[in-house]
Image (cartoon, rainbow, N blue to C red):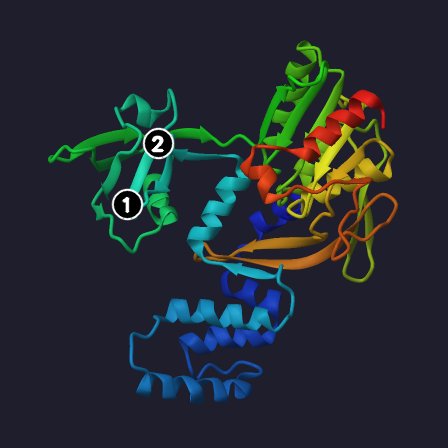
Amino acid sequence: MISGRITQVFLLAVFVTGLVIAAFGAGIGTAWLLLHDRTAPVDGAAEFGVFWEAWNLVEDHFFGDLPDSQHLAWSAIRGALAGLDDSHTTFLEPQPRKLENERLSGKYGGIGAYVSQAEDGRIVLDPMPDQPAFEAGVRTGDVVVEVDETTITPEMTVDDVAALIKGEVGTSVRLTLLRGEQDEPIVVDIRRKEIPTPSVEWRMLEEADGVGYARIMLFSGRTGGELKVALEELKTQGMAKLVLDLRGNGGGLLDAAIDVASEFLYDGVVLYEVEKGETERAWTANRGGGFTDEALVVLVDGGTASASEIVAGALQDRGRAVLIGQKTFGKGSVQSVFDLSDGSSVHITSAQWLTPDRHQISADGLTPDLEVGITEQDRSENLDPQLDRAVEYLTSGR
């Protein structure tokens, strides 16, 4: 999960090689320089003699294509990070980093169409109503053959094609499509616009009078505002009690987590952040929440992690909500994100979070007040015993 405070830092901290050296120390900095100049006089370079001894043998004997220097540098960074024994300290190449930024911002420049892979492996589109692709005549099931001048090949993934289609708002993209049994391809020019990616869905529950339901899929830059709208709309529909569903929510932005918790708390601590050297900071709720007194149940499971654990832990510790479901994932660490000059990034674990009662989230996770499981058979029969138990609790008080 990415701290809002740290996000501001990484937007300023694009220092190319110097950043790599500062972030990882002489080892990785040396590796990066050696990949560009084997004779570079860098501290610790002598220890990398064995690296080049091995790599020269690879160059001489490997039966296959060798990576270019950029991919070799990326591999060296990954290898060095693996030595830290921390699965959350990671390296992202430019394309995955771009997708991550779009996901967390809650918007992107695109045509408004879902991109997926059909059973035969071809990449197909499903346009969103009233969005540019729909208005340009794209139909569900249209097969993407070409994006601008790039031919779509069997080796390309959904993400590869989606990246080609996305771009700056106001620019145009030309798609060559195949439709049904038509022999001739269809060519459409579509002007990109800002496409929102909602992170909250909500409705009134038909099975219980006065009970609303809100599910948060991701904590993005849009989440706080979307939740406010959800609560306001549900109240106008008669909501007096709420089920907040955080199942399968893997996290997101810290600021968004604080905003969400603040909708249910008057004030007080949401979490403690402990940095290297045991420096501690308390993050508190913002005043003015829209649902601070009414009955609240939070659904959690093994996919509830990071930002969603912060919210669930705060509401549980503060006595504001009952947690129902299964034990959460246990990811309570902070990653500082630093963008590099080529569009890639490094995510470095720099702090840990504690709940208001100072329970450690990492590894331990959160234990629900009422443990309720859900089976594959339940899912196949479209049953949800966890939601049923939440409704029962809200309507019966136990």
SS at badge 2? strand
Image position of 143 with respect to 15: above or below: above
Report x, y in % for residue 175.
Answer: 24, 36
Report x, y in % for residue 35.
Answer: 43, 76
- Quadrant of the rendered image containing residue 393: top right
Q: Residue furthest left?
A: 183
Is any part of residue 378 visible from this angle?
yes
Report x, y in % for residue 164.
Answer: 32, 44
Classify 10 Å Cα crowding around label 2: few (below 14), some (14-19), many (20 and above).
some
Instruction: Confirm or deny contact between disc 2 and disc 1 (CB under 8 A).
Output: no
Q: Amino acid at mark 1?
A: Arg
Classify 10 Å Cα crowding around label 1: few (below 14), some (14-19), many (20 and above).
some
Residue appearing at x 58%, y 44% in the figure: 376
Residue appearing at x 28%, y 29% in the figure: 190
Is any part of residue 261 visible from this angle?
no
**Quadrant, the C terminus:** top right
Q: Is residue 394 left or right of residue 80?
A: right
Q: What residue does disc 1 label?
A: 122
Q: Is residue 124 left or right of residue 338?
A: left
Q: What residue does disc 2 label?
A: 126
